[in-house]
Amino acid sequence: MKRRGPLLASILFAAAMLQAMPINDLYASENHPKRIISLAPSTTEELYLLGAEDKLVGDTTYCVTPPAARYKEKIGSLTKVDLEKIVALKPDLVLATSLTNPKTIQKLRDLGIDVRIFPAPKNFTILCDQFLELGIAVGQELQAREIVKAAKEKVADIKSRTAMLVKPKVFIEIGAKPLFTANSDYIINDFVKLAGGENIAEGSKIGSYSKEEVLRRDADVILIVTMGFAGEAEREAWQKLKTLNAVKHDRIYIISSQKICGPTPVTFVKSLEEISALLHPELSEKNK
C-alpha cells in the first residue's frame, strides 16, 4: 500500500498557502502588466515605491524622482507625448493623467493598449485610494496597503497634535497676475486642513482671488507655492501690505511646488509635517 500521508500533507499545505495569498499575487505573472509607461511624475514615483520599477519601460521628461527614473526611456512631456515611441515600446499598460491628450488616450486604446487614467487627487483619501488602485493593477496590492496604512497612521498623528490648537487663517497662492489660489478642488487645501489650518479660500467657487479679500479676511499665514525665483518677488509684493497679519508677524512662506503637486502617500506625509511646523511653530518649540 502506497504511503499517501506525506503527499496529502504537501497538497494541503500548498492549498493553504495559495488561499492565504492575495488574488493579485496568485496571477501576477499572467494578469498583471510586464511593460508599463508612466505619463506623470507621481505615478512614476509610486511605481518605484511599489517595487515595480523593473516593469517601467518609459516615462516623461518630468519624471526625475527617484534619480533612477531619469534613465528610463523618455516618451515626451506631461501634455505632449510621442505616440509612435510609446507604441514602439510595446506597453501593456499606460498610466495617464487628466493632462494627457484625450485623442492620444483613444488612439492607444484603439490599438488594444490598456490605458488607465489617474486624475490629480483632490485630497489625501483619494490619493490613497488611487495608490491602492495602482498597486492592484501592477500586482503589488500588499505593498500598497502597507504603505497606505503607515501613511494614514502618520497623518492621524499629525492631525491629533494640532486638534486642540487655534487654527491660523491661511491664504495659498498658486499663481500671480492674476492672483490665483487653491480651493477645495486642490490637494494643498487638504494639506492645510490636516496640518491644523483654515484655508480662507476653501469655499471659493473659482481660483481667482483678490488681495483686497485677503486683507479683509486678514490671513495669518501666506503660503506661496512656486518654482524658481518667482516666489521671492511675490513675497516682497505681499510685504508691502503692512496691515496684513501675516506681514506683521513675518509669516509668508515659500513652498516648492515639487513637494505638494503630485504627491505620493509617502511624500504627502513629509510635506504635511513641514506645513504643520509652519502653521504651528509652537509645536516645534515644545519639542525642543
Image (spheres, rainbow, N blue to C red):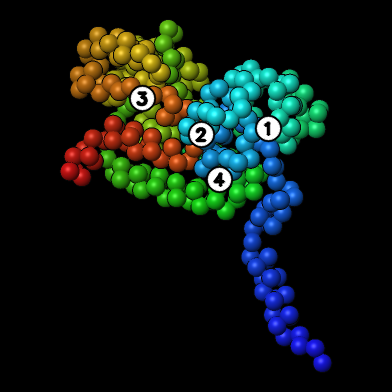
Earlier along the polypeptide chain: callout 3 or callout 2?
A: 2
Q: Which residue is disc 4 drawn over?
A: 51
Q: Amino acid at mark 1?
A: Val
Apparent side of residue 222 relative to residue 64 in the rendered image (left or right): left
- The image shows a total of numbered marks equal to 4
Residue depicted at 70% across the width and 70% down the height: 15
Percent x, y of residue 46: 54, 39
Tell me if 232 is positioned left or right of 75 in this view: left
Question: Quick one: label 4 or label 1, which is nearer the N terminus?
Answer: 4
Which residue is the site of mark 3?
A: 255
The x and y percentages for residue 92 are: 73, 37
Closer to the camera in the image, 2 or 166: 2
Q: Of tags 1 and 3, which is closer to the observer? A: 1
One can see residue 122 in this view: no
User: Gap in Å between the C-alphas at discs 3 and 2?
Assistant: 25 Å
- Mark 4 or mark 2: whose residue is earlier in sequence: 4
Q: Residue at x 48, y 18 (%)?
A: 207
Give x and y (percent) for residue 189: 43, 30
Residues tagged 3 and 2 counted as in contact (Cβ below 8 A): no
Q: Quadrant of the N terminus?
A: bottom right
Task: Classify mark 4: helix, strand or loop.
Answer: loop
Q: Residue 171 vs residue 47: left or right?
A: left
Question: Which of pointers 4 and 3 lies earlier in the amino acid sequence?
Answer: 4
Separation of marks 2 and 1 at Cα, in angstroms: 19 Å
Kindly state the secondary structure of the residue where label 3 is placed. Answer: strand
Compare residues 144 and 77 and report the one nearer the observer.
Answer: 77
Please name whichever residue, 14 or 136, is drawn nearer the observer in this view of the structure: 14
Report the disc number at residue 288: none
- Structural distance between the alpha carbons of marks 4 and 1: 17 Å
**Which residue position is annotated with label 2?**
68
Q: CA distance from mark 1 to mark 3?
A: 31 Å
User: Which residue is identified by label 1?
Assistant: 94
